[in-house]
Amino acid sequence: MAAKQSKKVPAPTWRRYDEVQKEQAVRMVRQLRVELGTSYGVAARVAEQLGFGPESVRSWVKDADIRDGLGEGASEAVQVDELKAQVRDLEQDNRELRRANVILKQASAFFAAELDRPHR
């Protein structure tokens, strides 16, 4: 009997890519999409050429498409950005109203003390 040879599966590596590399991959994918007229397999092809993981490239392209308003989810991304801005504005208004409330409470306490003070 021959002993089974087991293939060693390489452990996943965690590689950090800088923004320049990501943008280069996104540009290449978009360019190939236009040239080939299809998006099928383009991200994997670019990933292989650049030595990146295909899922990484696919996710970068998806994020860039959403950010630039090109792909699926673009309208949702715009709505999310608008809602975030609205929440930020409302939080600012809330802080200002709380400050005004504190000032009004202090002023009412001051004037109440003035009214309780005996006058000559």
Image: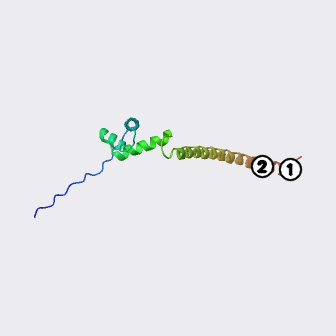
Q: Which of 63 and 19 is in front in this view?
A: 63
**Residue found at the very far right of the displayed protein:** 120
Colour style of the rendered protein structure:
rainbow
* Residue 74 % position (x, y): 51, 44
Mark 2 vs 1, N-terminal side: 2
- How much space separates mark 2 and mark 1, taking CA atoms? 18 Å
**Residue found at the very far bottom of the displayed protein:** 1
* Residue 47 % position (x, y): 33, 41
| Residues tagged 2 and 1 counted as in contact (Cβ below 8 A) | no
- Residue at image position (63%, 43%) is 89
Q: Mark 2 points at which residue?
A: 108
Based on the displayed image, in which of its 4 quarters is residue 78 positioned? top right
Mark drawn on residue 118: 1
Give the left or right position of residue 113, taking residue 101 as reference: right
* Residue 31 % position (x, y): 39, 35
User: Which class describes the residues within 10 Å of circle 1: few (<14), some (14-19), or many (20+)?
Assistant: few
* Residue 34 % position (x, y): 41, 36
Tell me the element at label 1: loop
Quarter placement of the N terminus:
bottom left
Tell me the element at label 2: helix
User: Which class describes the residues within 10 Å of circle 2: few (<14), some (14-19), or many (20+)?
Assistant: few
